[in-house]
Amino acid sequence: MKRVGLIGPADRDELVRLAIRLEERGAEPVFLDPREDAAIAMDPTHVFACGEDLSELSACYVADLALRRPYVLDDQGVPDPGASLEALDASRRQLAIWNAVLERLRRRGPVVNPPRSHDLHGLKPWEMAVYARLGLDHPVTLSTNDVATVQSPPSSRSGAWIRKGLVGGVSYTESFTPPGNQDEAKEALGDGPLLVQERVAGDNVRAYVLDGRILGAAVVVPALADDTDSRRDTHDVRRYELPDSAAQVAISAARHWGMIFTAVDFMIDAASGSHLILECNSAPFFVNFEKQTGVPITGELADFLISPPRPVSPF
Ligand SMILES: Nc1ncnc2c1ncn2[C@@H]1O[C@H](COP(=O)(O)OP(=O)(O)O)[C@@H](O)[C@H]1O
Ligand SMILES: [Mg+2]
């Protein structure tokens, strides 16, 4: 019987659903919950973690490594510099050992997704620069902490801008008005660099890619028509047929990052119909999307993990 590792909080909907689909197909899901003491040990022939012998796994899905917070807050909620250094070091070591484990597992079968793709959500300015270099349609983007530059962002097709976190998933996208003078610019940059993007006037689309093909896509409709972030209060998720050109963009971006499975976010520029890529998510939520759209993401993922169509190619 094939054993498939599921790394992440054991109560995460994505893992619970994936476990059911694996069992239905005659495979054994092996939950590896890294929140507790993961107790990792590696030797030349075996890898152990979370009380399991991982050498027996034929594939692995990574939802969340639950890394320790790399800082410590004091009673007032202010970072404690001394204790934070230790926490940062511990968190880095935890990441290093998980990365080593996942690289070892990649010799036996697919790891979805490979460790090198996990950090992308923290590298949004670079991610956008790579889409520009690859020639993939994307919103014009500026990342800066410079007082002069932030006052005159590059031209926007819609004439409006948004700002969002340099690290994905931690804050909402908000509308952005370029500061009119130096003082306003300093205030805008007060809590660090900004990522400013042309505001794309149109629908937000999410497409799931697995192993070089599109599983399905949907338009994410916000409750308020002019909301800058469709996730804040989502009204509806409507199945959508991605045009071939956008499908190719999603597939090429996923391939570029080495993501076997990903959710690719786009904005459609309503005026031109262009699909502008925003990001690839290496460990996306998918259970709600599946319920709302009927795209059988979990079943497809389970099929892939049990019978990957090609042998894996370790380094
Ligand atoms: N350039 C943009 N123009 C208009 N809306 C945007 C733009 N960028 C992001 N959004 C909205 O904000 C949401 C989050 O943006 P995204 O780039 O996917 O970042 P995150 O990593 O935070 O998910 C999108 O789903 C979309 O609704
Ligand atoms: Mg997103």
Image (spheres, rainbow, N blue to C red):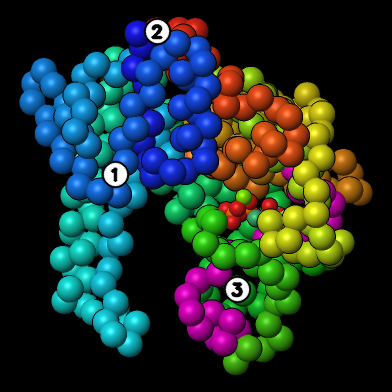
Q: What x and y, as percent, mark residue 151?
A: 66, 78
Disc 1 to disc 2, C-alpha distance: 28 Å
Q: Is residue 95 above or below residue 192?
A: above
Q: Secondary structure at mark 1?
A: loop
Q: What x and y, as percent, mark residue 205?
A: 75, 42
Q: Is residue 239 left or right of residue 211?
A: right
Name which of mark 1 and mark 2 comes first in the sequence.
1
Q: Are marks 1 and 2 in contact (CB under 8 Å)?
A: no
Residue 111 makes an appearance in the image: no
Magenta part of the chain: 185-205
Disc 1 to disc 3, C-alpha distance: 43 Å
Q: Is residue 227 left or right of residue 270?
A: left
Residue sitting nearer the eye, 208 or 255: 208
Q: Are marks 1 and 3 in contact (CB under 8 Å)?
A: no
Q: Is residue 229 above or below residue 21?
A: below
Q: Quadrant of ligand 1?
A: bottom right
Quadrant housing residue 140: bottom right
Is 186 contained in the magenta span?
yes
